[in-house]
Amino acid sequence: MKLGYINETDIQKKAEQTHLLKSNGCERIFQSNQYNKLFKALKKGDILLTPSIKGLNQTTRELIRMMLTFREKGVDISFLEDELTIKPNSEVTQVFGKIYHSSNENFRTFAGGRPSGPTVPMSVIKKIQKMYETGSTKAELCRKLDISAPTLDRYLKIDILE
């Protein structure tokens, strides 16, 4: 099945992109506010069409995580305006996997010479999320971990690729 994804807020551009996706055979089109529904809807053998690579993600880190998720699900992704299709077992997704996992579980981006993003290993963030899911309150976690509430909120929002 061909599914489409649009991450656009401008009404005219959204209409143009919807037309582009429909003319390329998309049966369902998801918008940015339906991101989680899109991932749940994707099945092995599906093809995800999106107008361009720049509209799929906000950061390189997120793009890499998405590409790894597509690989795990067995989904092709096609960036129509960029004339680029990435298959699940392509060398590109293998390189993305190596980049993602090569930095000792800390994947950081750099802006202005300073590291940004979580400064603790993803395995620790995963444990924090599990503690919260199993009933620890935010106040308890902040005290126990000696972190601020905004930091804890950031850690809880991180979608960790299994």
Image (cartoon, helix red, strand yellow):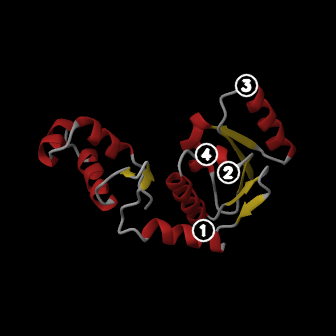
Give the CA separation, mark 2 to mark 3: 19 Å
Dot placed on the residue nearer the N-terminal end, 3 or 4? 3
**Residue at the location (55% across, 67% down)?**
96
Give the class, few, some or many, for how many residues have Cα within 10 Å of label 4's Cα (few <14, many ≥20).
Answer: some
Q: Give the quarter of the image for residue 119.
A: bottom left
Give the CA separation, mark 1 to mark 4: 20 Å
Dot 3 falls on a residue whose secondary structure is: helix
Circles 1 and 2: CB atoms closer than 8 Å: no
Where does residue 48 sit, x and y in percent of width and height? 70, 53
Q: Give the quarter of the image for residue 101.
A: bottom left
Dot placed on the residue nearer the N-terminal end, 2 or 3? 3
Which amino acid type corresponds to the residue marked 3 in the rendered image? Answer: Ile
Q: Which mark is residue 93?
A: 1
Q: Nearer the viewer, mark 2 or mark 4?
A: 2
Can you identify the residue that label 2 sits on?
53
Q: Specify whether residue 89 is in view.
A: no
Q: Nearer the viewer, mark 1 or mark 4?
A: 1
Which amino acid type corresponds to the residue marked 2 in the rendered image? Answer: Ile
Can you identify the residue that label 4 sits on?
38
**Residue at the location (34% across, 42% down)?**
154
- Give the vertical position of 21 relative to 108 (above or below): above
